[in-house]
Image (cartoon, rainbow, N blue to C red):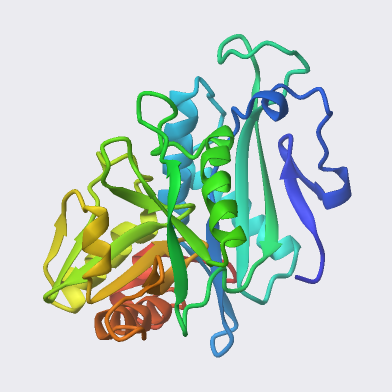
Amino acid sequence: MKREYAFFEGKIVPIEEAKISIKTNSFHYGTAVFEGIRAYWNADEKQLYILAGKEHYERLLKNARAMFMEIPYTAEELVEITKELLKRCEVEEDIYIRPIVYFKDLKLTPKLVGYTPEIAIYLYPFGAYLDPEKGIRVKVSSWVRNDDNAIPSRYKIAGAYVNTALAKTEALLAGYDEAIMMNANGYIAEGSGENIFVVRNGEVITPGVNEHILEGITRALVIRILREDLGVSVVERPIARSELYVADEIFMTGTAAEVTPIVEVDNRKIGDGKVGEITKKVQEIFFKAVRGEIDKFKPLLTPVYE
């Protein structure tokens, strides 16, 4: 990234001008709604591809409306703004895009009505979030995932991430790389910022969207890869904690995590303790798809440079 700008209060400005007051309402009450989007650089084509930009912004707008935030943009307009921001910053590398919708009012009442929503978008150079090659060690957390009737996990609400920050920190302090959280019903939900897939006897199992999880966009893409490209059966159902310990493979997905293998859970090796074959195949297709190397996935990509 050669220069650094942000989209802030309706225009693209130098990053140092994109600032909010310490009195900002959403800063105090965690009511902001955000997204994480990746753009991938294809060095051979000299092209930058935004992955599922429209889908991410559609989710952002839906989640914002659920929080009584109406902003005057369509998903398509936000994709165009993001393209312009990436061009202005002259990005020629993999990059992470963070849009966030927040109440900008300088008032101190925890409510969702009578306030003014605003959107900001900035860029963050971001490599591998977790180790996609060797895999990671995870711990089943003592912290329970947010219940849908408390703070819905399907909305990316800033305050909800206190829940996952507690779980992630617990795992790190115990010497693990990541946490797996269970829901209030005692079944596996997801990681601190990732959806989870379990491979047993050639079948892939993943928690359904009613298990208090984020309805992941990368999750949906990986399910498509498994079914259409690998011919693997994918079942969405509750997963018991004990199933993790007898799994053949486990992997996590997400915008940040991409496709990350899990090689150990609670000090128990998964399979032979190495990255599994189905996981490897998913990774191979995924990383080609996001850089525009597979034609069937190109409708999910937005090229930045004409």
Q: Residue at x 45, y 78 (%)?
A: 135
Rendered location of residue 188, percent (x, y): 30, 50
Q: Residue at x 73, y 13 (%)?
A: 108
Taking 31 as reference, is 3 left or right? right
Taking 230 as reference, is 39 left or right? right
Most distant residue in the right direction: 16
Q: Quadrant of residue 109?
A: top right
Q: Residue at x 58, y 47 (%)?
A: 165
Q: Quadrant of residue 62?
A: top left
Q: Quadrant of the N terminus?
A: bottom right
Q: Quadrant of the C terminus?
A: bottom right
Most distant residue in the bottom direction: 44
Q: Quadrant of residue 205?
A: bottom left
Q: Is residue 240 above or below residue 125?
A: above
Rendered location of residue 55, percent (x, y): 40, 50
Q: Residue at x 21, y 61 (%)?
A: 243
Taking 106 as reference, is 44 left or right? left
How many numbered marks have been drawn onto this rendered protein structure? 0
Rendered location of residue 133, percent (x, y): 47, 84
Residue nearest the observer in this picture, 215 or 83: 215
